[in-house]
Amino acid sequence: MSAVFDTLTYARQLQQAGVSPEQAEVHAYALQGVVQGYIGARFVHVDQRFDQIEQHFKEIDPRFAQLEQRLDQLDRKVDRLEGKMEAGVVRLDGRIEALAERHRGQFLLLRWMLAAVLAALVAGGWVLYRLALAGGAL
């Protein structure tokens, strides 16, 4: 790659500043060589860096593809686990509801049994009270 350096314009500027045409021409060509050499070296260096960066990208791209595949696999596993968890939650909800229904019936039965025992105690107490009033002592 070459740098554009206008030797004619540079030589004219030197001549206007009082440098002889021969010396201005030598200065212009010398400076052109320096500029082209420096800029050319810079371009080579930049091209080499771009080549290195491009090589790194070539190495990284397959890694990203592998990571994407792995993430897709993990997504599928998570989806399966979520499905299993949802099914488990539905099963547990059903079991809890069945237990609650069974216990509701048992508590209702216990309430009635307690009411019957309480009624028997009240009736027995009433009988004892009436007997105590009627006969004096037991």
Image: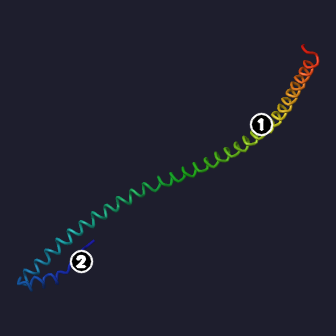
Whether residue 126 is situated above or below residue 64 in the rendered picture:
above
Residue 13 bears which disc, if any?
A: none
Q: Nearer the viewer, residue 100 or 15?
A: 100
As measured in the structure, the alpha-carbon distance from the residue carrying label 1 to the one carrying label 2 is 90 Å
CA neighbours of label 2 inside 10 A, class few (<14), some (14 to 19), many (20+) = few
The x and y percentages for residue 106 are 82, 33
CA neighbours of label 1 inside 10 A, class few (<14), some (14 to 19), many (20+) = few
The x and y percentages for residue 13 are 12, 84
* Secondary structure of residue under mark 1: helix
Residue 4 bears which disc, if any?
A: 2
Q: Nearer the viewer, residue 64 or 83?
A: 83
Image quadrant occupied by the N terminus = bottom left
Which residue is drawn at the image coordinates 61% and 47% (left, top)?
78
Whether residue 117 is situated above or below residue 96 in the rendered picture:
above
Residue 99 bears which disc, if any?
A: 1
Question: Total marks drawn?
Answer: 2
Drawn side of residue 61 relative to residue 27, left or right:
right
Drawn side of residue 86 relative to residue 133, left or right:
left
